Image (spheres, rainbow, N blue to C red):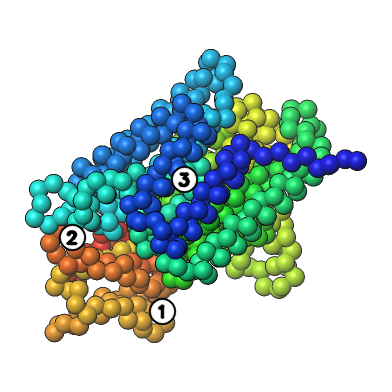
Amino acid sequence: MDYIQVTFHPVALYQLAAFPCALLYCYLCSFGHLPITLRYIYLLVGGVILACISMGSYSVLLFIPALGSTVLLYTVSYHSVHWWAFLLQMAWLTGCHLWLMYKQYFLQEIMTIKLSIMISSLMLLTQKVTSLALDIHERKVTVIAEGCIKEKWFHVQPVHNILSLLSYFIFFPALLGGPLCSFVEFRQQVNYAQQVNYAHVCTNLWTATRGCTLFLLFQMLRGVLSEKISLQCNLVDCRQLNCVYVMWTTALLFKLSYYSHWLLDEALFHAAGFSVEMNAHIKFSDINIYTLETTNKISMFARTWNKSTAKWLRRLVFQNCRKNPVLTTFAFSAWWHGLYPGQIFGFLCWALMVEADYRIHMNVDTILKSWYIRFIYKAITWLQTQLIIAFIMLAIEMRSLSMVFALCCSYNSLFPLLYCISLIFLIKEKFSSPSRGLIDTTIELGQEHVQGCRPVRGHFGDTRIDCNRADRNSVGTGVTGYGGFSGSGTFRSDGSRTAGGGEHRRWSVRFNILSRGLSSTKYVEGLSGSLETMGGFSVIRSRSFLGGF
């Protein structure tokens, strides 16, 4: 009798071993048996133990930046803390990546599991450090104590704050994987754990059980497919259309492995009582298999694949880049992942595919009218999307230059090449035909304008800021008729804040535009100038882009 052979990655075994500790922590917190300080110690000690067991002596390379980042965030001013955190953390991560490549390529050493786990955890630590540094810079986390010479955290004792920071950086439910949780959410969920709530404990137990069950099912499915599918990963030996079969089946096994481990990571995260809220009363999930497997848009796949990392990249790079934000975001992702030849090629190819995919859908959607033609179009673009993603995934996962060469010399290269040719033609026609795009503008109101300001929606999508003052200053943001553009936008308030001793409020607006002959950059410049000349309003961030990450 043949049995299905299911093999577990060592990371999965470590995560499964941490489940009892996570459930115990949730139980003790829910029933009030664990004071707040001991909760931080429990999470910190659990993370240290898990790191030492899973990484061995390499865990020192994780503890050093965790301690260094704590000192940095506690001493550097909020004006520049995000730059220092980014540079130092990425410098350390890059050094570890280069050291690993030196051991592999020059010393011809085989990369051990413990070393690969350390690199993965260090990448997750980079997410936490840079996210917290951005929160500090944007004053979402207050670090300056009024009337004190030295900066202190949250007006409480520094020792407790250092403990909470270290605990956040290496707490065991998210040490080896899991969604990115902000420091504010982490601190709130540790400090304000529910007291004697049976429903809370049962919900976490059910989430952990469901996640483990789905993990096992995906692992079994992967085991079945591994036996049934002829794994011809050597693309050098395949011929013609057989290379497409090899590429697609290999990428399918990679995706099943990712799905199963993401489910397990998220289950452990929830088993400990943690969650990430997308918005009010809606829990954030890092995985959406249905969307990933059914979407016919590469840009949607990019936003859905590992959602928390995509949100982090969007906030850290995309929203702060003025030129070529999509290309810059994917280039940084290649840097963050390790700068292997296959990763550089794969992520840059992904960026081009996102741009091409967006422009193709933008132009074709306005032409197709009948439902059956739309259905055929979606089926063809779905197949194209899956094959391009498989092409990119193999380049990134295989990493080597020889694999990139094998992919490019096979029939597999026809799928991304088709989109590249389409992108060239669409760029040439950019200024001769109507094109759609997005404009992001953030407007900051000074202290004298913050009282009573609110967005007011007018007719035909026109939106303005109305302030309850004697002179009734209002800013019209309808875009119809300016510079050949038409469209509309809505404002979203980021809330009031204190910065430099003054009361401020930020409003963000995103315009959906239809361009006829002029670049959206020129429109942004005109819009910014008109807003800044109307007294009290300052455009602090304004940019345009096509597509999006």
Q: What residue is drawn where x is 53% and y is 15%?
A: 106
Among the two numbered marks 2 and 1 on one chain, the one whose residue lies closer to the N terminus: 1
Q: Is residue 380 shown above or below 495? A: above
- Of circles 3 and 2, which is in front? 3
Q: What residue is drawn where x is 41% and y is 34%?
A: 62
Amino acid on which disc 2 is placed: Ala
Residue bearing the label numbered 3: 172
Badge 1 marks a residue whose secondary structure is: helix
Any part of residue 434 in sight:
no
Q: What residue is drawn where x is 55% and y is 49%?
A: 20
Mark 2 nearby-residue class (10 Å; few <14, some 14–19, many ≥20): few
Discs 3, 1 touching: Cβ within 8 Å? no
Any part of residue 18 in sight:
yes
Residue nearer the viewer, 39 or 317: 39
Q: Is residue 61 shown above or below 503? A: above
Q: CA distance from mark 3 to mark 2?
A: 35 Å
Q: Is residue 98 shown above or below 301? A: above
Among the two numbered marks 3 and 2 on one chain, the one whose residue lies closer to the N terminus: 3
Q: What residue is drawn where x is 66% and y is 51%?
A: 215
Quarter of the figure with residue 454: bottom left
Q: Is residue 340 shown above or below 283? A: above
Amino acid on which disc 1 is placed: Gly
Residue 499 marker: 2
Quadrant location, the N terminus: top right
Q: CA distance from mark 2 to mark 1?
A: 32 Å
Mark 1 nearby-residue class (10 Å; few <14, some 14–19, many ≥20): some
Residue 23 marker: none
Question: Would residue 268 be found to the left or right of residue 467 on screen?
Answer: right
Residue nearer the viewer, 208 or 320: 208
Q: Position of residue 474 (x, y in %)?
A: 23, 78
Residue bearing the label numbered 1: 461
